[in-house]
Amino acid sequence: MSDIPVDIPPALPSAPKTRAPAGTTDTHFHIFGPKDKYPLSPQRMYEPALADVDQYLAMAEIVGIERVVIVNGSPYGADNRCILDAIQTFGAHRARGVAVVENDISDAGLRALHDQGIRGIRFNLITNMTTIGDLRQTIGRLAAHGLHAQLWLKSHVLEDILSIIDQIDVPVVLDHMGQVPTSLGMDHPHFQNMMRLLETGKVWVKMIGYRVSEGAPFDDLRAPVAEIMRRIPERMIWGTDWPHPLLKGMPMPDDGRMLDLLASWCTETQLKQILVDNPARLYGF
């Protein structure tokens, strides 16, 4: 029997009390199609449940999401066929993507991804699929093709990114609030390194808070979100992380309730900035 953890299927969310503003953008979720059509990598960390475009649209209609950014999930490795097909299904007017590539991808390959709706390349520094050396090698080639770098990393690696940020000439997006656990506190060097990166004007952060929280009701996220919004409001974007893979026993997050939480921590103007204006600038909607 395989030791690979198996994900549970996504559940429909509660209807949020918050009315999402027009143009609300989910900048981080995954699509997992039928395995016979989209085979999984033998090196995958987990076995995803089926989570197709129709299932996502059912969730998005309840929450009020209009625009989407699909991130290639790690179980596919550098095979981007599933998200490229999904972008076509959603339509170029409302969908963008973040791909995963091999370090030796050609310039023509990067250009082709951009032409198909890809706007970012995800670097996985969590499982050592990518090293800082790999990042240095590839990141400099992205700007010419209108692509940014999205980093999935552990929070101690933020110090390494801070040391090379002056050499990076493309936007950088940090997954999952930089993976800085709220339990560390905002005075911790990991949180401060994230803030220093955001203040360079080159870096964005995704508000996908449940991954770094100590758990429901997620009150521990209020202070770090407020601090980012106070100092660098133009650098925060939001994502559901649907279908919430690799929960490891954590309860399935309710995407409607998570939107309500964010709204409770922001003014109406700030909420629109996070959900609409900031992602429109980054992804070109």
Image (cartoon, rainbow, N blue to C red):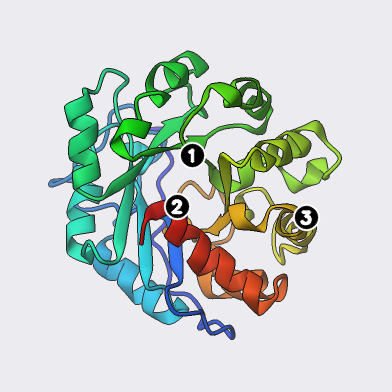
Asked if residue 51 shows in the view, the reply is no
x and y percent of residue 48 in the render? 35, 48
Contact (Cβ within 8 Å) of mark 1 with mark 2? yes
Picture quarter with the N terminus? top left
265 or 32, which lies in front?
A: 265
Q: Answer with left or right where residue 89 lies relative to residue 143.
A: left
Rendered residue at 65%/42% (across/down): 198
x and y percent of residue 80 in the render? 24, 40
User: Mark 3: which secondary structure?
Assistant: helix
Q: CA distance from mark 3 to mark 1?
A: 21 Å
Give the numbered dot on residue 270. Answer: none
Q: Which amino acid type corresponds to the residue marked 1 in the rendered image?
A: Pro
Q: Is residue 137 above or below residue 113?
A: above
Rendered residue at 35%/39% (across/down): 147
Classify mark 3: residues with Cα within 10 Å, few (<14), some (14-19) or many (20+). few
Picture quarter with the C terminus? bottom left
244 or 18, which lies in front?
A: 18
Contact (Cβ within 8 Å) of mark 3 with mark 1? no
The residue where tag 3 is placed is 227
The residue where tag 2 is placed is 282
Q: Residue furthest top?
A: 133
The residue where tag 1 is placed is 171
Q: Answer with left or right where residue 263 lies relative to residue 83.
A: right
Q: CA distance from mark 2 to mark 3?
A: 21 Å
User: Mark 2: which secondary structure?
Assistant: helix
Q: Residue furthest left?
A: 37
x and y percent of residue 63 in the render? 46, 77
57 or 251, which lies in front?
A: 57
